[in-house]
Image: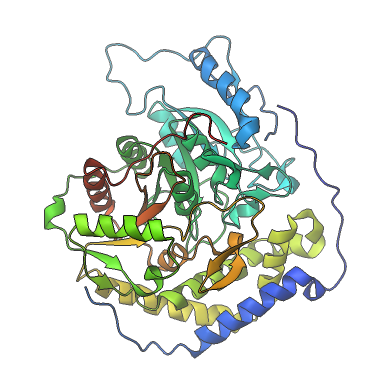
Amino acid sequence: MSVIERAPVGVGHADPATRPGVIQNLALLADYGAALAAFDGDGPVASAPGVASPRANTVGAGHAPLIARIRQDNPRYLAFTRIFDVAADGQPPVVPAMPAPALADVPFAVKDLFDVQGLPTTAGAAMRVDAAPASRDAEVVRRLKAAGAVLVGTTNMDEFAYGFATVNAHFGTTCNPHDVSRLAGGSSGGSAAAVAAGLVPFALGSDTNGSIRVPAALCGIYGLRSSHGQVPLDGVFPFVEALDVAGPFARSLDLLQTVHEVMADASLAPVDVAALRIGRLGGWFDANLDPELRTGLLQVADALGANGLIELPQARASRMAAFVMTAIEGAHLHRATLRTQPDAFDPAVRDRLLAGLLQPAEVLLDVQRFAAWFRAAMTQLWEQVDVLIAPAVPCVAPRIDQATIEIDGQPVSARANLGIFTQPLGLAGCPVLAVPLWRSGQLPLGVQLVAAPGREDRLFAVARRLEALGLTGAHPPEEGHP
């Protein structure tokens, strides 16, 4: 693969507050900040393509056909940014007398914000292509390799993980394998597309506000946001410390669970689904639904006996808080480069970060005050229910050239609002499993299963029940898809 051509980078000197994109983001942040400043804690708690890879990163000769297929198909999807070479001597075989590792010889890919020894971690940013190479693999990558998995490449993403589309001004737009004229979602869209297209059995992404769950739903596969803090983030490029989580994508629940157990270094016990109290989120999560998504969601709820609606405490305010926290903390992380090289950023990402950089300190204090209230309210909620069901996205994947989707009867930015159902959940630190509705031959739609922190076991048990009933499950893109 050839090294991607990069746009000229200059240093901007104009007042950032005069940029049109910054002005738009400032207005939105001002509205959200005012609402959070006025929040007094009252209200009911709910009832029940490519950088050339160095020779140091190679895969065994036995994977040569897979590598050849990835190289052949990747231009269609732009899922991978690096594809590793095949070593002439291959990898040493597993000793026959020893038990095979959990993921023996299973190929996988990682979003390009996981450190891979010997490579610069770009985090989707052209300005990092020439960064110092990582001295070692990210901890979760190391664990997966120790379990026998074989890393075959790195995947495309929104710059610095700030987006829901995987539209990258420097590295290109990742296309949805179910229809390459449509978005794959983001910010982990390259990983989701690689799995959905069958290029790798599993891939890793990160989720701050929905960056695993949105592309999983739009690409019709499983994606897990684990409990906050359960999976180590050592060697993963940061975004928002209070929200960042690493997690896997897969088309198989069994494989997804195995990967999660390896990443978390913990085993999940079986769970009796019949004993679980399951509810469906209403209010914020019962509006702006594609009619076919509503039908699928109701079928899932009915099959699980979740016929009553439960209100997530202050869902709209929780989304606002996550939005504002992301802008401010992301801007703080990149403040030095924003001041010296603003034009080195993807313009859309730059303007969101600059707006965050211009926020006064008290805005973040209001966000943190709300976040503490929200976590306490969610703790009370988990005393009444074990698993919650919610939509993952409002609609099927928009076309790449489609600027807006309809929310509350108004056209709004598609790329900014694909996460309206994922953003409110991050502050609580809960595990969330994105589950694809069974829609063979149709564009994918997905639902979220949510549980209390540390209860991924319940999510997998419910997902297996739904798959056994034929209501959910991943399916490959149709042959001859657009």
Is residue 3 positioned above or below 13 on the image? Answer: above
Splitting the image into 4 quarters, where does residue 41 fall? bottom left
Q: Is residue 50 left or right of residue 423?
A: right
Q: Is residue 128 left or right of residue 256?
A: right
Quadrant (top left, top right, bottom left, bottom right) of the C terminus: top right
In the image, residue 376 lies at what x, y percent?
A: 32, 76
User: Which scheme is used to colour this image of the protein?
Assistant: rainbow
**Quick check: can you spot residue 45?**
yes
**Quick check: can you spot residue 118?**
no
| Count of numbered marks | 0
Residue drawn at (24%, 68%) of the image:
382
In the image, residue 210 lies at what x, y percent?
A: 48, 57
Of residue 206 and residue 280, the one placed in the foreground of this image is 280
Quadrant (top left, top right, bottom left, bottom right) of the N terminus: top right
Residue drawn at (63%, 53%) of the image:
160
Of residue 150 and residue 19, the one placed in the foreground of this image is 19
In the image, residue 231 lies at what x, y percent?
A: 40, 49
Splitting the image into 4 quarters, where does residue 24 fall? bottom right
Is residue 30 positioned above or below 101 on the image? Answer: below
Q: Is residue 352 left or right of residue 18?
A: left
In the image, residue 227 lies at what x, y percent?
A: 36, 56
Is residue 97 positioned above or below 349 on the image? Answer: above
Q: Is residue 286 left or right of residue 10?
A: left
Residue drawn at (21%, 46%) of the image:
465
